[in-house]
Amino acid sequence: MGRKRQPKQLELSFPNLPRGEAHGRSGRDERTMVTSGYERPTIAERLMEEICEPANLKRALKRVKGNKGSPGVDGMTVDELPSYVWKHWDSLREDLLQGRYGPRPVKRREIPKPGGGVRKLGIPTALDRFVQQAVMQVLQRQWDSTFSEHSYGFRPNRSAHDAVAQAQAYIAEGYGYVVDIDLEKFFDQVNHDMLMGRVAQRIKDKRVLKLIRDFLNSGVLQDGLVSPVTEGTPQGGPLSSLLSNLFLDDLDRELERRGHRFVRYADDQNIYVRSERAGLRVMESLKRFITTKLKLKVNEHKSAVGKPSDRKFLGFRFTAEEVPRRRLAPQSAARFRAKVRELTRRAIGHSLVEVISDLRNYLTGWRGYYDFVEMPWELKKLESWVRR
């Protein structure tokens, strides 16, 4: 009976893990040993061993499967991933521990932006997503407590709603102008050498450093051709957001040093000041910092100083009242209508059941996020439009 149930254990079991190798033990780890064909590093360099711990790998596999996602360049689906990991675990683990693991190129996918242009996503293979997730979990556990309290994006126990609520609190305190800085194609323009310099300040295990560098340089497959990548952290991989938070931590610390009230969610940065004059001064000085110190570009067309009631933040706006209220940004309502039209137009070639299911899933997720508005009539108006 045990053999018949084995496939259900693929997410929970990793075979042939020599006892003591995947778990840190004080005392023995401080000397270099040779076990199972590889040289055990000193305790300061055992990050890869921590990444390969069974408990960490189980979490990573569960998360990657739960996130679903499209196949990468090799065509492997997330449903096929557990059996592949089970079958090839010995060689996969050995490659990781020896620093030989080589990521595949990411598959390019372009998502149209509502205001024009495209957002370039890089879809790693399911196996690469699994390895990235395992690395990210360990690094996030070590790094997160060192990040700024003003950073909210892609961090444990923090959300976009928390960021919006903090922005609202600054406005209520009398900071009635916002310096809205848009970083132009941030995820495509991060300098790899600068990023790896920051990573190397926190990581001593050369195998992990090499692995992260290889993920950054893995290349992009588009139209049958693989192109090299020399900049950016491709959106689509679990490591991307953590590395982006690390890179922008310098900006957070600079704003803290200056004593500013600010909120950052990934590359969405808002600074709150008391006057337009102060806002213009802050805008110019931060442009210099961003271009000279971080080697990034500021989008001049989207960046501006204005009233919070005229600017959107994470899909919301604020009322121009003494005690501001959260409301739906016009762009969010327009995007909602466009998405609903797209989903209902797809009825051709799809069953009615599929269309209704897709529409219901979208409406449920959208309502779950925008229920945070404090002017519910805006949502009811859109619901009435959907029912027409």
Image: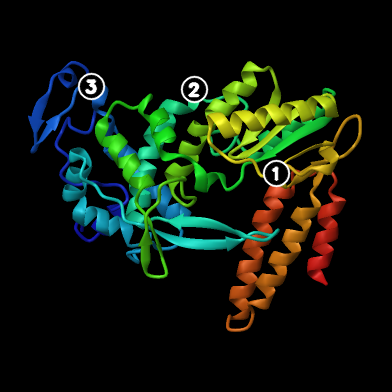
User: What amino acid type should be assigned to the residue bearing mark 3?
Assistant: Ile
User: What amino acid type should be assigned to the residue bearing mark 2?
Assistant: Thr
Q: Which residue is mark 1?
A: 300
Dot 1: within a 10 Å radius of its alpha carbon, few (fewer than 14), some, or many (20 or more) residues?
Answer: few
Q: Nearer the viewer, mark 3 or mark 1?
A: 1
Residue 319, numbered circle: none
Quadrant of the rendered image containing residue 4: bottom left
Q: Position of residue 2 (x, y in %)?
A: 20, 55
Q: Does any portion of residue 166 appear in the rendered image?
A: no
First in sequence: mark 3 vs mark 1: 3
Taking the spot 66% from the left edge, 65% from the top edge, the residue there is 360
Taking the spot 83% from the left edge, 26% from the top edge, the residue there is 277
Q: Which residue is mark 2?
A: 146
Residue 43, numbered circle: 3
Compare residues 80 and 223 and report the one nearer the observer.
223
Q: Position of residue 171 (x, y in %)?
A: 81, 29
**Secondary structure category for the residue under label 1:** loop
Q: Position of residue 66 (x, y in %)?
A: 45, 53
Taking the spot 27% from the left edge, 29% from the top edge, the residue there is 205
First in sequence: mark 2 vs mark 3: 3
